[in-house]
Structure formats: structure tokens, C-alpha cells
Image: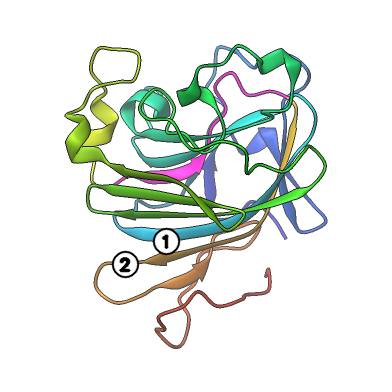
Amino acid sequence: RSLKGWQGATERYVVDGGSLVANFGPQPYRGPEPAHLFSERQYDDFTLRFDFKLHPNANSGLILRSSMEGSPARDGMVLQIIDDFSSEFADLKPWQRSGAIWGVVAAEQGHLKPPGQWNSIEVICRGRQVKATLNGVVVLDADLESLEGKAAGGGRHQGVHRISGYIGFNGSASQGRVEFRNIRIKELTSGFNDAPLPAVAPFSRSEEHTSELQSHSFI
């Protein structure tokens, strides 16, 4: 079990008991070097499923269709993963809370489990539609075309125009400990590629293309 198959700031992530772990400490990371973790290759339309566990005051995010240059929250999209129960984050805007596309569109709240408990999430990117299901509840179903590239706080957001890019985990302003497990992706373009994202295994292609995500053991 290793970080083979990932690229970027691999020194800031570890494998612990079959989980991919980000631990940025008690203060938001604002170091001079990017701390993002990216997939080895790019994806366009896909279903992505994984479990995550937040520790108190933790802040992270799922990178979607991003460039590896610049900021994933602007040059791609970041689906927010944050401890909504924390008083430290009491003043966040709706588009900064869990399940939201950061800076773009808010998600329905009230479905995140408290710190220390595992959450399950499914994210589907198909064309201009992004749908997120958190713990069995659809919390986000966004038509990016209707946003016309506008950010929630005003101005323009170039990342929503991307139709492909890297996926991964955000390191900008991240803090605390977040654990990820059972990370799996299925491409929705020419056939299905049901493969475990490395957490910690390299990408691989299943022997059969099926309509459902299958369980895989970590390599």
C-alpha cells in the first residue's frame, strides 16, 4: 500500500490502515508550495465514490476536473469537505460548506455526520451536470451551464467551463486530519472503467465492464 498512482504533494499524505490520510495540523495551510494531491491522469465524465472521516476542525476538499496549475478552486472545481459542526467555521457562507462547489454553488445542509464518523459520498460529473450524494441524500445537483461561469460571490469562475481534468484532494487552506477510504471511479464515456483510485493502489481496469461500481481490495 502506497501513494503510487497519485502525484503532486505526496509528501503531505500518508497511508494508514488502508486509508489515505491528510493531516495539515491545527492551522490552515498557506505554505509557499501547493499541497494538492492529483490523479495521474485526467477524467471527463465519471462517477466517483469514497468514504471520508473528518476530525474536529478539519477542512479539505475534493478536486474535480482541475488543471494542475494555479488554484483548483478557480482552475477547476473543489467540492468542499469541512467540519460543519465546528464553531471555528460558524461564519462560513453556504458555498463554503460541505457538499458545495466552493465559490460556485451551495449544497443542501444537515446530512454530514459529526467528526469521528465515516461519511459516504458519490459524485457524478456528466457533461455540464455535477451531482453529489452525501450519506444517501442528494445534496447538490448543479447545471454548470446555467451558472454562465459566475462565481457565488460575484465575478467569473473559469473552472466551471472545464470538461475534463484531474481529480484529487485540495491542500489550499486545508487543516486538521481527514481520512479517505474505498476510493473508486467509473468513467462514463466510451464504456465503463471501474477502477480503484489509489488509496492506495494504482489505477487498473476491471476485467468486465458493468453498470455498477464493484468492490475492489486495495493492492
Residue that appears at 30% across and 20% down:
151
Label 1 environment density (alpha carbons within 10 Å; few <14, some 14–19, many ≥20): many
Relative to 18, residue 167 above or below: above
Image position of 84 (left or right of 163): right
Q: Is residue 38 magenta?
A: no
Q: Where does the image place residue 117, in percent across and percent down from the top left? A: 79, 47
Instruction: Using residue 83 as the reference point, say whether residue 131 is left or right of it.
Output: left
Of helix, strand and loop, which one carries label 2? Answer: loop
Tell me the quarter of the picture where residue 154 sits.
top left
Specify the amino acid type for callout 1. Thr
Which residues are drawn in magenta?
A: 164-175
Disc ID at residue 13: none
Position of the C terminus by quadrant: bottom right
Q: Is residue 174 magenta?
A: yes
Q: Between 217 and 110, which is closer to the camera in this rendering? A: 110
Real-space CA distance between mark 1 and mark 2, rounded to the nearest whole angstrom: 7 Å
Q: Residue 25, position in %: x, y? A: 77, 22
The residue sitting at 34% across, 35% down in the picture is 67
Q: Which mark is residue 188?
A: 2
Image-based side of 1 in relation to 205, left or right: right
Give the amino acid type for the residue marked by disc 2 in the picture.
Leu
Q: Position of residue 110 (x, y in %)?
A: 62, 38
Q: Which residue is mark 1?
A: 47
Question: Residue at 54% of width from left, 22% of height from top?
Answer: 172
Give neighbour class at mark 2: few <14, some 14-19, many 20+ (Cα, 10 Å). some
- State if disc 2 and disc 1 touch (CB < 8 Å): yes
The picture quadrant where one finds residue 86 is: top right
Q: Is residue 187 above or below residue 81?
A: below
